[in-house]
Amino acid sequence: MPDVSANVAGLKLRNPTMLASGFLDETGGTLLRVFKAGAGAVVTKSIGPEPRTGNTNPTVVELEVGMLNAMGLPNPGMEDFGAEVKVALDGGAVVVGSVYGKDPDEYAAVASRLESYGVQAIELNLSCPHAKGLGTEIAEDPEAVREFTAAVKAKARVPVMPKLSPNVSDIAAFAGAAEDGGADAIVAINTLKAMAISPELKTPILANRVGGLSGPAIRPVGVRCVYEIYEAVDVPIVGVGGVETGRDALEYILAGARAVQIGTGLATRGMSVFADVTSEVAAYLVTREVHHTSTFRFRSAMEGAPGQFIMVWIPGHDEVPMALSYLGDVKGITVRAYGDATNALLKYTAGDLVGVRGPYGNTFHLDGRRALCVAGGVGIASIIAAVEGFSDRGTKVSTVLAARTAEELIFEERCEEAGEVHVATDDGTRGFHGLAPALAKRVLGQHTFDSVVTCGPEPMMKAVVDLCLERGIPVQASLERFMKCGIGICDACVLDDALVCKDGPIFTGEELAKSHDFGRFRRDESGRRIPL
Ligand SMILES: Cc1cc2nc3c(=O)[nH]c(=O)nc-3n(C[C@H](O)[C@H](O)[C@H](O)COP(=O)(O)OP(=O)(O)OC[C@H]3O[C@@H](n4cnc5c(N)ncnc54)[C@H](O)[C@@H]3O)c2cc1C
Ligand SMILES: Cc1cc2nc3c(=O)[nH]c(=O)nc-3n(C[C@H](O)[C@H](O)[C@H](O)COP(=O)(O)O)c2cc1C
Ligand code: FES
């Protein structure tokens, strides 16, 4: 199993799944059972200052798309709950205490009490849609979110994570308010306010009339909320709502979440949902692109920008440079089989371990109104983040995607999502029949480009750079040389007097125009100059 551990504001999780508040979490015994079944952490039922019975039944409606509930926050109150927390903690569980109250002082008092029981973090339920006076009003007022968070933060020593409501028009503003109040992380989302009516009995089913919708139906809302919050705040986010599979969890992670919580998924997949989602997330970390090229995904807090590379250690074989073909929390490298190290790596499956260090090297400058990206073979792995980066910044992007044969084309969909794609194959099995520079020349004549980036076999890059120099278009090429240290101290990767690992791997057209080595020579492992 690859390292799927997560760190949410100092709360260390062995995997990115957590039990959502309100499910099997009123007693220490069930909290511990869920933890032992595989959850990275368990969140308690929302606890208030006094015992509370909640709403009368019916409190739950099962729907095809999820579940509607109006429990009304039943809980034993903070006094009695210490014994339950103790059972879970003594059994080794990572426990997050969920708190509610009617005013900031009550929230702070309950949070302090749960902290005194030993919980490792506090979640603030600021978002229950069906307990009047206990969440609904706070959830709709950003200033209240700030004030309640600040009151708890003033006393708490463990991380404090307000849980936000999706029943607002601009959830990012609420996340910003929580961050202003000192939140260490944000949890999103609670249930969506909803209702079910029985046509037969001609009456709302829930005794409370309205309740909160959970389960698969709300996942797209949750993912959208996490995405918007991620853009607005710097603190980590925990995604909740409709997670049942590893794919669902990855949606949240790719939207910006560090971890996910699972509630209703327990009803559909049972208690093994945590272990299943974890192994499914891990399984997504290796994708075979074409028969000799695979993408390996891994979670890493390391930074990374378009064009940068990492050093990948394949124990017993070698340590080799690889471009980051995916950025964000779940990074990726895309590996083509060449020799010993890459062939060994391609035999790896999800769960096998490699060492990674980095990221290293400089990054692409993503300026301009219209950019052309020219990729040959696995060279697309080095520039795909730039293709997407240009598009994210509003630059129009055209990509020339070239391979020897149709079956070897990779990342075509990602390029299409970013802009226009022109395919070339050496053997004519797809698109333009011929080499990338010939197609690039044609595309350069179709639009006015003010930026070109390229990566692929060096003769291809040389031809593309020459085309741009002739036309006066700024061009950047990502170069490959044999590397040892990757950090600019061993001289193995030298290109003229520049170091590809440190001064590169991206070089501008002007730099390459002056280069004696570019397109002509590389160095072998002993440092001898070899014609390309
Ligand atoms: C900054 C940087 C980023 C890179 N990013 C990627 C990437 O994203 N994906 C990827 O698959 N590779 C990438 N590479 C290339 C990768 O590091 C090499 O392919 C790898 O080191 C080869 O190791 P090996 O042990 O498999 O092959 P070796 O045993 O070292 O080489 C076997 C044979 O293949 C030839 N060869 C090796 N590499 C290449 C190559 N790249 N092109 C053509 N012939 C080659 C050698 O000359 C030799 O004849 C990158 C290199 C650099 C410098
Ligand atoms: C029966 C039930 C009880 C819940 N109780 C709480 C609660 O006490 N505190 C809280 O913050 N959220 C509570 N929730 C909301 C969940 O924690 C979660 O945010 C929501 O169900 C979405 O996740 P899911 O689709 O994985 O269930 C409850 C949800 C349900 C269905
Ligand atoms: S790899 Fe050592 S200096 Fe570049």
Image (cartoon, rainbow, N blue to C red):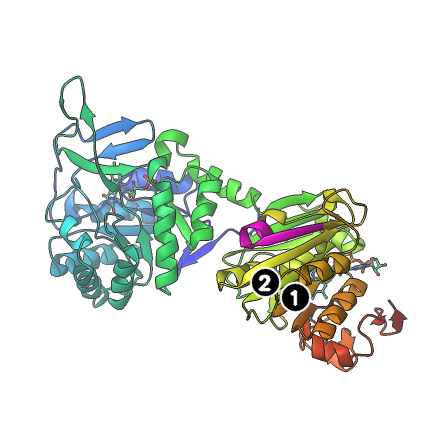
Ligand 1 image position (quadrant): bottom right
Q: Quadrant of residue 441?
A: bottom right
Toward the viewer: 494 or 350?
494
Residue that numbered label 1 is attached to: 453
Which residue: 73% across, 42% down?
Answer: 407
Identify the amino acid type marked 2: Ala
Q: Is residue 443 magenta?
A: no
Q: Nearer the viewer, mark 1 or mark 2?
A: 1
| Mark 1 vs mark 2, CA separation in Å | 8 Å
Looking at marks 1 and 2 on the same chain, the residue that comes earlier in the sequence is marked by 2
State whether residue 480 is above or below residue 32: below
Toward the viewer: 445 or 389?
445
Q: Do the CB atoms of the residues marked 1 and 2 lie less than 8 Å apart?
A: yes
| Numbered label attached to residue 386 | 2
Element type at mark 2 = helix
* Crowding near the residue tagged with mark 1, few <14, some 14–19, many ≥20 C-alpha atoms within 10 Å: many
| Magenta residue span | 414-423
Q: Is residue 415 magenta?
A: yes
